[in-house]
Image: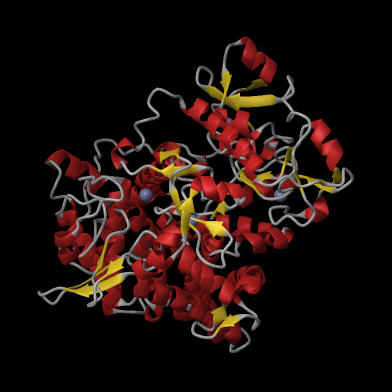
Amino acid sequence: MMSLGAHGLASLMLIVLFIGFSGAELLAIEDSDMVYKPEGKSRIHVDGCKRFGRATAEVKAKTPKMTWGEAKKQGLTFCSRCPAQKGVAPTTNSKSKGKSSGAVTRDETAIKKHAKSVRSRLQEPEKKYDPNTKAYCDVLWMRAHEENCEQLILKEYKKYIPLEQADKEGWRIGEYGQNGRKHCCFKGYRRKHPVAEPPEDILVRGVPGKRLHFDGCMRSGPTKDQPRMTLKEARAKGITICGHCVGRGPSLTYISEKHWKNIATNGESFTPPEGWEPKAFSPGAYPSKSEIDIYIKQSLQGNSGIMGVQFDNPVATVENFMTMRFFFPVGPWLKYYMDYRSTGDKRFLDKLLESARYYNKLSKEYTSACQLKASIPEGMSYMLSMAAWSRITLQLALKYPDSVKQSEIAEAEDILKTMIMVLKPTCEGDENLNTEFGIPQALVTIYQSVMYNKSSSGMGTLAMASAALEDLQKLKKTTKYQSTIDRYRKCVQGWYKNWKENGCLYTEADGKTYFYYAYAGTGQKRADGLMTGSADDVGHFGISMSGVALVHDSTPELGADDEFMTALANAIYHNSGTKNGSIQCPTADKIKPMSRHPHNPNPKTQFFWFEAFRDGLIEAQCQQVNASVKKNTLSSLNGRCTTLFGQYLKARRKDSTLVHLGKK
Ligand SMILES: [Zn+2]
Ligand SMILES: [Zn+2]
Ligand SMILES: [Zn+2]
Ligand SMILES: [Zn+2]
C-alpha cells in the first residue's frame, strides 16, 4: 500500500475497507432468483443493491420483477453498483463474510476472480469488429482500448495497432482498473488468441519466500528490501507470482531509478530519547516544550504523502496515478495539516509543500488525465496537499505579513491556478446546471450516488481551495477569482445539503442533537425524520470525518459549523458506549441496532479531536478496554496527534482567526 503502511491514522480504516470490498461476501446467483428492472431503465438490480436500495418501499413494490434466468435471456445486465454485477448475488448470511475464503489463498482467489471477470464478458452479446479497428495501447499494463474509451487516458502519447494484431499479440482487450477486472470498451468482442504470458526475462520484485510482483502491482511496495530478479530466476527458486499479477498480466515498464533512490533515502525510524516513554497528551493542557519537541521529531519521520510510483515511462506514472484511490490515502496529508495547526512548526508545512509541488507539476504536465481524475470528489482529494498548503500559507500571509515571503504567495497562487484549471470542467461552466444546487447536474448525480466517505475529503479540498482564493483576493486586492470561489462554495454547500437531507439530524428528549447517516443513500425514515437501517460503520464514519475537519476549518458556514460538529460528536460519544458497529442516535439504536461491520471496542484515535465539541469524548472512547490498551492508544503517535488537534479546535472556537497553537 505504498507510503500508507507507515501511517497508523489510516490503518484501522484500511482493515475495515478491505473487509468491506472483499469478494468473500458474494455468492452465486441462481436462475430462479428474482431481479428488479425499473421501467425505462436498461439495467437490473438485486434486492441488496445500494443504488436500488435508495428507492422507497412504494417504488420498490411497483418495480417489475423477473427471474435472473429470464433477465439473462433478454440480455439484461446488472447496474454497476449491484453486488450481483458479475453474475453473483449477495449472501444474506453476513456471518460467513471473510471466513469462507479460509481454505483458499488470496492468490488463488485473485486468479479466480479475474477468470470470472473474463467469463462474464461472454454475457455481453457478441459484436463484430473490423479487424483494422484502432486499438490504443496502454504503457503500464499490456492493455488495448477503443479510440473513444473513457479509460483511455493520454491518448496523444499512445500508439495504436489494428485490433487483430492486438489480439494476436495477446494484449488484454478493454480491461481496466488495478486488477484488470473491469471492462471499458470493445464490448461484445470475442478474442481469438490467448492473452500474452509474461516473458521469462521480465524483472519482478518482492519478498523472497512470499510472492513476487510485476512493477506497478498495488498489492505490495515498492519498499527498499525487495530484491529484483527475472521471472525465470524466481521460478527456479520456487517463488510464486502474486495472483493479482497473474490475473492482470505483465507490465511494460519498470519503476524508475529515481523512485528507488527516493525510497532508499526515506523513512529513517525515530529513535526515542534515552529514558523517554510515550505518554498521553491531556485533552485540556498543552504539553511541555520538551514533549512537543519529541512529538514533532517523531511526526516528521514520515514521507510527504506523495502517492504512487514513478516509472521509466512517465506516461505509465500517470496511468498508475489514475488507479490510485484518494479517499483514505490522505492520512499523511491530514496528519501534517493537523500537526501544523497544533504546533505551528513550519516543517509540517514544508512536508505538505513537497507533496503539493509534486501534484502541481503532475497536473500541469498531464492536465487532461488530472481533469478526468478530479471529475469525481474522491479524485479531487489528490490535490489535498496543494489546497492545505496554499490555505495555511495565505492565511499566515494575511495575519502575519512578515512571516511569509512574496515568492511563497506567488507559489500559492500558482498552485491554486492549477487547481482551478483541473477543476474547471467538473465544477464550473453554466451548461446543464442543477437549478436547486446551482452546480453542474453531473456533480449532483455523483453526490447522490457515491458513498459519503469517498467524497468527503474532496469536499474538504474544495473548501480549503475556496478559502485560500478568498485570502489571495484580499492580499492582491482583486476580485478576479470571485466566480470560481462562489462556485466552489456552492459545490461544498450542495454536498452537505444532500448529506444532511439523506442522513439524520435527530434531537433526543434530553435536547441533544445527533447526526448520523447511511453508508450510501439513505435508510428508512420515520415521519419525524428518525432514520433506521443502513447507518455507516465506525470505520467509514471516521473516513468521512477527515473531510469534515477540513470543511470546518475553511468554510464552516457551508455545512460543518459548530452545531453540526457537536451533533457528530454526540453520535460518536453515544456509540462509544454501545456494542454497535454502526453509529446512530440512541433512539434508533433502541429500535434497530446496526453493525455494517462488527463492533470493535478499541478507542478510535480518528475521533479524538471531537473532544472539542463534546467534553469527555476521549474518555468515553476508552470505556470498553483495559488500562493497558487505553494507555497504548492514548500515547500512540496518532492518539497524541488527534488529542492535540482537539485542543486547537477548542481554542479556535473562542478565536476564529487562530492559525495554530504552539510557538508564534
Ligand atoms: Zn465498511
Ligand atoms: Zn443495482
Ligand atoms: Zn477501454
Ligand atoms: Zn502483484
Depicted 120 relative to depicted 233: above or below: below
- Figure quadrant of the C terminus: bottom left
**Depth check: 238 or 57 in front?**
57
Depicted 639 relative to depicted 195: above or below: below
**Depth check: 287 or 22 in front?**
22
Depicted 292 relative to depicted 389: above or below: above
Q: Is residue 306 visible?
A: no
Question: Horizontal placement of 509 versus 474: left or right?
Answer: left
Residue for point 51% across, 58% down = 352
Residue for point 51% across, 76% down = 491
Single out the residue that lies furthest toward the top. 236
Determine which quarter of the picture holds residue 340. bottom left
Colour setting: secondary structure
**Residue 577: % across, % down:** 14, 54
Residue for point 52% across, 67% down = 39
**Depth check: 537 or 302 in front?**
537
**Residue 315: % across, % down:** 74, 48
Depicted 496 relative to depicted 205: above or below: below
**Residue 347: % across, % down:** 47, 56
